Image (tube, rainbow, N blue to C red):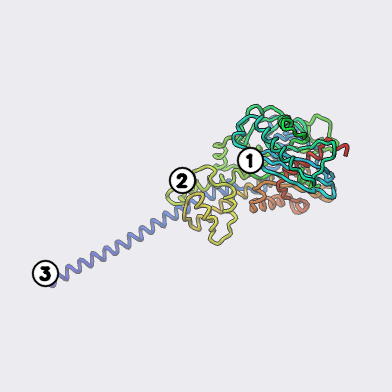
Amino acid sequence: MGKAAAVGTAVVVCAAVGTAVVLGRRRRRRDAELLGAAEAERKKKVAAVIEEVERTLATPTALLRGISDALVLEMERGLRGDIHSQLKMLISYVDNLPTGDEHGLFYALDLGGTNFRVLRVQLGGREKRVVKQQYEEVSIPPHLMIGTSLELFDFIAAVLAKFVDTEGDEYHLPVGRQRELGFTFSFPVNQLSISSGTLIKWTKGFSINGTVGEDVVAELSKAMERQGLDMKVTALVNDTVGTLAGGRYMDNDVVAAVILGTGTNAAYVEHANAIPKWTGLLPKSGNMVINTEWGSFKSDKLPLSEYDKALDFESLNPGEQIYEKLISGMYLGEIVRRILLKLAHDAALFGDVVPAKLELPFVLRTPDMSAMHHDASHDLKILGSKLKDIVGVADTSLEVRYITRHICDIVAERGARLAAAGIYGILKKLGRDKVPADGSPMPRTVVALDGGLYEHYKKFSSCLEATLSDLLGEEASSSLVAKLANDGSGIGAALLAASHSQYAEVD
């Protein structure tokens, strides 16, 4: 090959290489532009979903006031006995709340799920209060949850009898007196008196033949007799009424109790003459504790998103317990999961493949949500670890973690603010929502709160309290105390056994 030809070939090769380099650069630039455009589009979709979530779950103060007003109307309908009322407003027959003067030995049995507790307490009157208390928690064998009424109550009575046998010298039962028991029974009951009520239906995994329609106190009493246990049930209550009693014993200004745990409920002290459906003699105290069963409240004012509607539709009780599905620990984590799933499907939040575990209902529990929400580390390491364990995504970006925490914040804030609206409604019904018109000082008002959601989810409880203060206003809120009544229902039942004792008049 001649020199000129060789040079020509080199020029062609160089030109080709140069062209390839230029084309490569253009391709990489185009690929980068495409990737950038795809990422921008993804972020746009993420922002659109979050914006919609923020809009549909928003709870402006004006809306909360409207919800409170709607709740009060339903409370009044329930107290009239209106069969169309969403709130049962059940008469508890508790008209004598503990005063602090109670003394003596009393027992409690707390049956509300797969475990039950037996408790004893020695009361020493106003000066000594609770001298001593002991309790024991026992798991119910699964086969007894689907067995017969006889088997279940015999098992419970046998445990109770053994517990009584361990009574030490520090517990004193006056000679000639029966032991007395407060029975916390957290299943739907048609209450007939302070110490009797017929079971409406079993819930929480129980399915026992022969108990529905029967008096649960009579069933327990017969089982205790079969065990040779001389004990009288003097009070049948649900856990919320028990919490109210326990709260009142510790603080005489307690007017209501609210449970915010797996489920939710509220009870409060109503003026007996404000209960039109009450047909008996007015109680000496002039008051009656009402069990609102407020979880069943629903209103077109409640901010229901597509996630809430889908959750309700797929639940075991569609159309029921709407308020509970918005604010209780059973459901908050599930609402977060559904929003994250939407972000995964519509905006590839976790990458091109939707994590299979995220498709599983209730895989994200509210305690996990709380742990993620409270993560204050600079890189949200705890949150990332939770997503790895729960969703199965090994490596999440800081952006994904911040988005997840924001979703937790939106859902928890809505739940807390709606719960505050419910409490505000009860205070409004009692006339404790504003300073008296006659200029008299605002009475101190205490609300006893119990349940794991309120106790352990600090951002939830803080938001609830701040919202309640905002609704009440500065002057009225200065007289309000929200007080944790940890495990109030157990000792509350024993205290109600004392305040409704067959020997109360004698003492």
Mark 1 and mark 2: Cα distance apart in space: 34 Å
Task: Name the element at disc 1.
Answer: strand
Task: Name the element at disc 2.
Answer: helix
For the residue marked with disc 3, what is the amino acid?
A: Met
Q: Label 2: few (<14), some or many (≥20) within 10 Å? A: few
Name the mark on residue 309.
none
Q: Is residue 21 visible?
A: yes
Q: Is residue 234 above or below residue 379?
A: above
Q: Earlier in the sequence, mark 3 or mark 1?
A: 3
For the residue marked with disc 1, what is the amino acid?
A: Ser
Nearest to the observer: residue 42 or residue 269: 269
Residue at the spot of label 2: 356
Name the mark on residue 139.
1
Name the mark on residue 1.
3
Q: Earlier in the sequence, mark 1 or mark 2?
A: 1
- Is there a contact, CB below 8 Å, between mark 1 and mark 2? no
Q: Is residue 363 above or below residue 199?
A: below
Q: Is residue 73 visible?
A: no
- Is there a contact, CB below 8 Å, between mark 3 and mark 1? no
